[in-house]
Amino acid sequence: MLGWGLNVVVGLAGLLDLGYVAFYAVGAYSYALLATNFGLSFWVCLPLAGILAAFWGVLLGFPVLRLRGDYLAIVTLAFGEIIRLVIINWQSLTGGPNGVSGIPRPTLFGIPLTPGDDGLAAKLGIEFSPTHRIVFLFYLILALALLTNWVTIRLRRLPIGRAWEALREDEVACRALGINTTTTKLTAFATGAMFGGFAGAFFATRQGFISPESFTFQESALVLAIVVLGGMGSQLGVALAALAMIGGFELFRGLDQYRMLVFGIAMVVLMIWRPRGLIGHRAPTVFLERSQAISSDLVKEGHG
Amino acid sequence: MSGDHILSVDHLSMRFGGIVAVNDLSFGAERRKITALIGPNGAGKTTVFNCITGFYKPTSGTMQITHDDGRSIQLERLNDFRISKQARIARTFQNIRLFPGMTALENLMVAQHNALMRASGLTFLGLIGAPSWRSAEKHAIDLARTWLERIGLLDRADDAAGNLPYGDQRRLEIARAMCTEPALLCLDEPAAGLNARESAGLSELLLSIRAGQGTSILLIEHDMSVVMEISDHVVVMDYGVKIAEGTPQEVRDDPKVIAAYLGTDEEEAIAVMESGT
């Protein structure tokens, strides 16, 4: 889901964002703090976390989006670090390195999944088992991921999505066609950040505990790797890549210290064989007669 | 200057550091007419274009567009995308700037961005698939289809723009500019790199745009066969200043223009200047 969110920013709009984890953190902390301090439920906080992350996306975007390419990447990288450092040092609010614990679990329309009398298991008259919650969380993330995917697919067919891609292809031409490039980039940033926020809120509720250690540059790099591996702009590619990355990580766990080596070699091989990612071609958003994939040779990568 | 001008440029100057690219240039483009801006390489034609279309901010001077409803807009006060959005001026580029990784149809759809954004309720109506959005999208596709048919690319609508032959890309760029439904269409060397047959087709297309849509056209062109055939009015520039203007015939016979294009030795130049004044 993070991959899909970042895909909007990097894949479609061609803006290289190395600090994506910042929005993930914003989402996670906004849920954690709202829930523990004000007792708001997961379903209220989820949209709030998304909105807050999007707000930060816009806030970051305003000064930063006039930068291009490498410079944009560096500033977003710095932003990711700034958010992390703020979280560590703002002890009174975020608990600093200790993190926030005791984050409430999500409920099913107000019915908690607990062993108590008012829990879902008791209401349904079945025996309580902690597996239920894991299954529930699985379906929850699946639903969120599908929602992200659905929204992204819809967005691509809307003028805003098409403008994102046009921006990646040729910014000067966009301006000549009367497209406000600043707001278009900002919406891409905000949309990506919003999905990052959703994912963060889910992460917080799943773990029940969050600390700044979860939001290092490592995470940003991993998500970016997923997007690049999948083929920028391709939804299916990103899903496959996420599967390969996370699955591969677990699969090679037995190799211990050689795991990263295997990983690195795999990435290098892939970059040689499929420099534009697993699914490198681009599907048109609208067609008259038939939809035919566009070879990746023609699709620009964008540079800020 | 007389007549009904859609665009009037007054005392336009553009300096880049010490270089004066355009010096105190004044000219007008008449409504529903084709005005050509010609001159030798480096005369400052593209700079004038970039000023009009908001890519450069002129050092001094004013530019004003007057729409059919009498509304006037000072162009030097608007910047980049607002020129196209509010002043309704569309342009093409000397070196083609299509979206190569998007299909011909998508290119034309992007051009209708502002109209479609309104129709999609800034995305939200479109996201839930509201009927008003669906009909607006259908309308946009129909408009794009009409243009593809006019430039003879209907059968290649779903091909990537970057895959089209050069001449087709030129025409597609004009169609894309027209999809923004402009009042004034600015074309920067539309015939560059086209063969004689393609140039003739281009002339026909431009004449049909003027006749059909009533769009005023301002074009920079080196291909004299195109300029002479379709222009109603020609402005000749050299070294950033206007050296002549008039009908194609008048300009063709103007000794100053001939001198600028062919070059003269000094005596001849003096003779030309004297005979010209």
Image: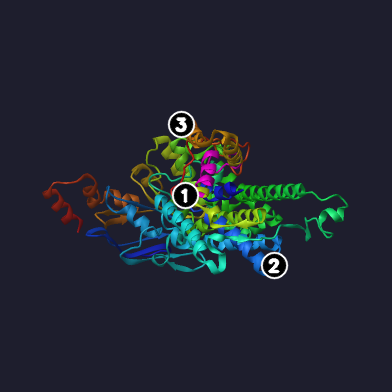
Cβ atoms under marks 2 and 3 closer than 8 Å: no
Residues in magenta?
A: A220-237
Where is residue A263 shown, x and y percent of the image?
A: 51, 35
- Residue type beneath disc 1: Leu
Residue hosting label 1: A16
Q: Which residue is mark 3?
A: A272
Q: Nearer the viewer, residue A192 or B207?
A: A192
Q: CA distance from mark 1 to mark 2?
A: 37 Å
Whichever of labels 2 and 3 marks the residue nearer the N terminus, that label is 2
Three-letter code, disc 2? Gly
Q: Residues within 10 Å of mark 2 (few under 14, many from 20)?
A: few
Residue type, numbered disc 3: Ile
> Can you say whether A21 is above or below A63 in the image?
above
Whether A108 is drawn above or below A302: the answer is: below
Based on the picture, tell me whether residue B193 belongs to the magenta stretch: no
Chain letter, disc 3 residue: A
